[in-house]
Image (spheres, rainbow, N blue to C red):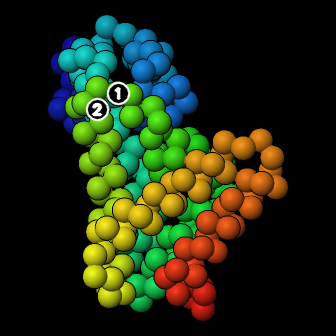
Amino acid sequence: MRYSSAHKAETRERVLKEAAKEIRERGPDNVAVAGIMARAGLTHGGFYAHFPSKDALVKEAIGTMFADARRRSATIDAEGDPRSVLRAYVDFYLSPAHRDGRDRGCPLPTLSGDFARSKPETRERFGAGVVGIASRLAAPLGQLGFASPDAEAHALLAQLVGGVALARAVGDAELSDALLADTRASIVARYGLETVQ
């Protein structure tokens, strides 16, 4: 039976979504193609109709994770006052909901350590996701008059990711909440976002 190109594209997207979930759960080196295909409602044998290798699947699934994160964090792309835009993004990123949602949201706090040990081409794809988020942060920072908005965006992103990663890693709920709140307070003060809601 021959399938249309639209059906093939939909099937491929379904596999990528399942792969992204598995990468978040297990890390990029521990994904199981058979399990991903089964959850997508397909046979293991059909895998090679969509991807030449497991490495290719992981590389493409990285893009899926960053696209999903972009949809969930559209506040940074909003038009309007750059302080309000930045504050909305910081509030989202350092929220308990984002901390607790390892299976969705930004993949950086969950997977940075895993991808640091990956193959160069996979790390390049992950790096492209980092650049994409940093460039989205650089836009309002540039509007706020920072001389080096790209460098400022890198520093801000590192603080956001570190805050969430540490808040997820500790076993004490009170300390976890404090890490989020203290990181948020530091960023809000540094960028003069106190009066913005």
Residue carrying label 1: 118
Please tell me whether mark 2 sits on a helix, a strand or a loop. Answer: helix
Question: Which quarter of the figure is the C terminus placed in?
Answer: bottom right
Where is residue 155 drawn, in percent x and y?
A: 41, 64
Q: Relative to the observer, which residue lies in front, 175 or 100? A: 175
Q: Where is residue 56, by image quadrant?
A: top left
Q: Relative to the observer, which residue lies in front, 171 or 49? A: 171
Q: Residue at x 39, y 34 (%)?
A: 116
Please tell me whether residue 70 is drawn above or below residue 191 in the rendered image.
above
Amino acid type at image mark 1: Ser
* Label 2 to label 1: alpha-carbon separation: 6 Å
The local crowd at label 1, few if under 14, some if 14 to 19, many if 20 or more residues have their Cα within 10 Å, is some
The local crowd at label 2, few if under 14, some if 14 to 19, many if 20 or more residues have their Cα within 10 Å, is many
Q: Relative to the observer, which residue lies in front, 68 or 159? A: 159
The answer to whether the residue labelled 2 contacts the one labelled 1, judged by CB atoms less than 8 Å apart, is: yes
Left or right, residue 106 beside residue 140:
right
Q: Relative to the observer, which residue lies in front, 31 or 179? A: 179
Amino acid type at image mark 2: Thr
Where is residue 106 drawn, in percent x and y?
A: 47, 51
Q: Residue at x 82, y 55 (%)?
A: 174
Q: Is residue 136 visible?
A: no
Please tell me whether mark 1 sits on a helix, a strand or a loop. Answer: loop
Residue carrying label 2: 122
